[in-house]
């Protein structure tokens, strides 16, 4: 579904080639300030070859622009030896003198004597967006290169800019248009785009993507994770048309801790960056005009009188139509306004202390194999969370789609958003840090206008060391620098000595929450023994338990001491509540996890079968006993906090 504010093409400037079905664009929204094409691979890293890249920062709210969806059936070729990328001396074809020779040429034999060993036209097709693992049995566990091709018609207009946008490709993507390389992007969960203004041709065009989901030690995430390594073009692809001068980026949010001031900026790009920009919020009667400087930037700083804005909250997720116009360009968005801060042990939403009644979730549909494919899948998961009386979700362990964040805005669900700095990273490798910093930056810039997002997380369960503290400390400082209006956190680890559980991590000094994972009753202690433990938390900060849980095979019933049973999981939850409620600063939790999910780390042939069974809902959508136990606990927490009144 195209975002309601998207402007449709006025005429058939673009059309998918006959036989290539065009699927409607999934609702999602992109990010940062557009920059001139630079010679990069990722986050400012120098390119390994002499070719300039057309990689550019994604446009904020690209779905609000004139665009053509390139979703649909893409032809694909499996290439485990990367014959389509390297010659027999293992040199990349796209770095040769001619730049030709790879599968990206989409070459056809000239006659019967010509030799071509691939053919996209006769190859199978898969749905995009979509992972390849769930679309062909032989690709279920595949890690490596797959080439994907789409064909479309274009009629580029003089004086217009054109951008080729990808919502996400896992993990490394080399992108070619009409046989010419546009560039490369690493990172499987954030958007990227290329300037193709001078590369489109009138008539037939073809885009080829070399997608490679191979795991590597020095990447983000690293080789060791606990989720399925879904490969492919997993989010929307589109071709966007922009005016000669256009609104590249903007931030329109309440100022830090101040419900009476809107603060932000607008950034122009293109031919004439100095522009007068009009900002309007019609329903609130707010209008303003700013003028950008020679670099195309202007600050936004507007007073807001009492009663002008209804503040966004889970109970009342009010979104306003916000419009920006500069010259020929006009962008419309739906934005909520709220404040979030901490004070001692309290988390204050719009000045009122709240308890984060949460649950963690992966970007995966348990009922239909693979990544979430669209709004229906996403709404189903968020609705399950709301049925449990959740007001909060942890979107683990990587950036989820723009559309998921938009739905959280609409449905009134607070969000913890995270980057995949997970377990043991190459802490001393500068390229690894640059990668992590780029993914964090892309996430924050993409979702900075979303009221639902209240926490930026810089990682999960990372072991303490001097190198790790430096690495993650720099990430925390990046998050604070990019956005001082939201909380910054990480899922920390605990230490145990005797019956004392200690939370003391140097990284916590840079974070706004004392947030940590603990698996009492599953990975350590029994259900009964956990009640003998107590917590020693060294920080005067709100405590949020980011993970606890137990595996349970839905429908397997036994006594409360039998592992893998629903009764064991249910008892663990009840005992966790007794144990955790003794923490004075407890202000939220996200038990692990909403639904069972696939994981190659979970091989038990009966209880797991390559599924992590810690879900409160089974792989066929059945609610386990602990689902209702958690709901009962959250109902009580809601009554407690609704009666507490304002803390301000």
Image: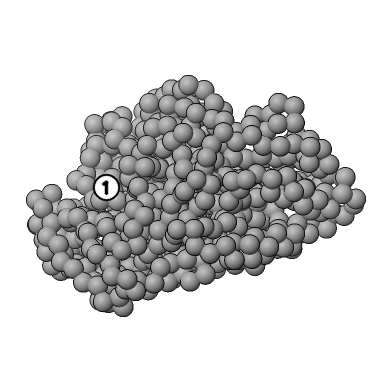
Corner quadrant of residue 24: bottom left
Q: Can residue 101 be spotted in the picture?
A: no
Corner quadrant of residue 71: bottom left
Instruction: Point out residue 358 in the picture as x, y percentages from the top left corner.
Output: 60, 56
Instruction: Point out residue 400 in the picture as x, y percentages from the top left corner.
Output: 49, 53
Instruction: Point out residue 247 in the picture as x, y percentages from the top left corner.
Output: 21, 60
Q: Secondary structure at mark 1?
A: strand
Q: Residue at x 49, y 58 (%)?
A: 647
Total number of numbered labels?
1
Instruction: Point out residue 426 in the picture as x, y percentages from the top left corner.
Output: 48, 26
Q: Residue at x 21, y 68 (%)?
A: 279
236 or 428, which is in the foreground? Answer: 428
Colouring scheme applied when the structure was drawn: one colour
449 or 311, which is in the foreground? Answer: 311
Q: In the picture, which quadrant includes the C terminus?
A: bottom left
Q: Can residue 178 be spotted in the picture?
A: yes
In the picture of the structure, the residue carrying the numbered disc 1 is: 56
Answer above or below: position of 142 versus 262.
above
Q: Residue at x 64, y 65 (%)?
A: 639
Q: Residue at x 49, y 35 (%)?
A: 508
Q: In the picture, which quadrant includes the N terminus?
A: bottom left
């Amino acid at each position: 579904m195209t975002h309601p504010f998207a402007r449709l093409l006025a005429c058939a400037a673009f059309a998918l080639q006959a036989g290539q079905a065009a699927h409607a664009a999934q609702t999602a929204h992109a990010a940062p300030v557009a920059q001139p094409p630079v010679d990069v691979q990722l986050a400012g890293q120098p390119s390994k070859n002499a070719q300039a890249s057309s990689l550019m920062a994604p446009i904020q709210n690209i779905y609000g622009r004139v665009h053509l969806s390139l979703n649909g059936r893409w032809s694909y070729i499996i290439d485990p030896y990367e014959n389509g990328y390297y010659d027999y001396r293992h040199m990349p074809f796209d770095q040769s003198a001619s730049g030709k020779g790879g599968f990206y040429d989409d070459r056809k034999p000239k006659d019967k004597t010509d030799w071509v060993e691939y053919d996209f036209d006769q190859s199978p097709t898969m749905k995009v967006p979509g992972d390849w693992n769930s679309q062909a049995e032989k690709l279920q566990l595949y890690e490596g290169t797959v080439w994907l091709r789409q064909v479309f018609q274009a009629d580029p207009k003089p004086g217009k800019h054109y951008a080729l946008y990808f919502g996400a490709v896992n993990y490394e993507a080399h992108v070619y248009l009409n046989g010419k390389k546009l560039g490369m992007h690493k990172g499987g969960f954030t958007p990227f785009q290329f300037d193709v203004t001078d590369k489109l041709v009138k008539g037939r065009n073809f885009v080829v993507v070399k997608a490679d989901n191979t795991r590597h030690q020095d990447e983000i995430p690293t080789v060791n994770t606990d989720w399925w390594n879904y490969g492919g073009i997993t989010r929307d692809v589109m071709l966007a048309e922009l005016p000669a001068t256009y609104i590249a980026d903007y931030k329109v949010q309440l100022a830090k801790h101040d419900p009476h001031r809107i603060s932000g900026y607008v950034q122009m790009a293109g031919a004439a960056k100095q522009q007068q920009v009009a900002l309007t919020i019609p329903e609130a009667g707010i209008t303003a005009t700013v003028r950008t400087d020679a670099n195309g930037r202007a600050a936004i700083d507007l007073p807001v009188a009492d009663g002008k804005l209804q503040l966004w909250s889970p109970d009342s997720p009010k979104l306003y139509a916000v419009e920006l116009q500069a010259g020929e360009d006009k962008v419309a968005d739906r934005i909520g306004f709220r404040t979030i801060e901490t004070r001692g042990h309290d988390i204050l939403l719009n000045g009122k202390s709240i308890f984060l009644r949460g649950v963690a979730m992966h970007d995966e549909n348990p009922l239909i194999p693979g990544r979430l494919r669209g709004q229906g899948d996403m709404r189903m998961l968020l609705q399950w969370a709301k049925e449990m009386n959740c007001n909060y979700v942890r979107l683990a362990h990587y950036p989820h789609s723009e559309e998921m964040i938009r739905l959280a805005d609409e449905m009134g669900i607070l969000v913890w958003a995270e980057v995949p700095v997970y377990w043991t990273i190459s802490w001393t490798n500068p390229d690894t840090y640059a990668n992590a910093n780029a993914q964090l930056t892309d996430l924050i810039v993409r979702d900075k206008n979303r009221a639902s997002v209240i926490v930026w997380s810089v990682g999960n369960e990372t072991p303490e060391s001097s190198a790790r503290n430096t690495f993650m400390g720099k990430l925390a400082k990046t998050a604070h620098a990019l956005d001082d209006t939201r909380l910054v956190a990480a899922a920390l680890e605990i230490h145990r000595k005797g019956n004392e559980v200690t939370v003391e991590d140097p990284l916590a000094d840079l974070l706004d929450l004392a947030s940590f994972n603990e698996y009492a009753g599953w990975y350590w202690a029994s259900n009964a023994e956990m009640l003998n433990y107590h917590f020693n938390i060294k920080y005067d900060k709100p405590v949020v338990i980011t993970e606890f849980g137990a595996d349970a095979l839905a429908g397997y019933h036994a006594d409360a001491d039998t592992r893998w049973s629903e009764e064991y999981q249910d008892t663990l939850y009840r005992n966790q509540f007794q144990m955790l409620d003794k923490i004075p600063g407890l202000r939220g939790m996200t038990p692990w996890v909403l639904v069972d999910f696939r994981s190659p780390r979970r091989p038990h042939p009966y209880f797991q079968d390559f599924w992590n069974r810690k879900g409160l809902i089974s792989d066929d959508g059945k609610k386990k006993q602990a689902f209702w136990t958690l709901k009962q606990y959250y109902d009580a927490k809601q009554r407690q906090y609704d009666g507490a009144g304002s803390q301000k």
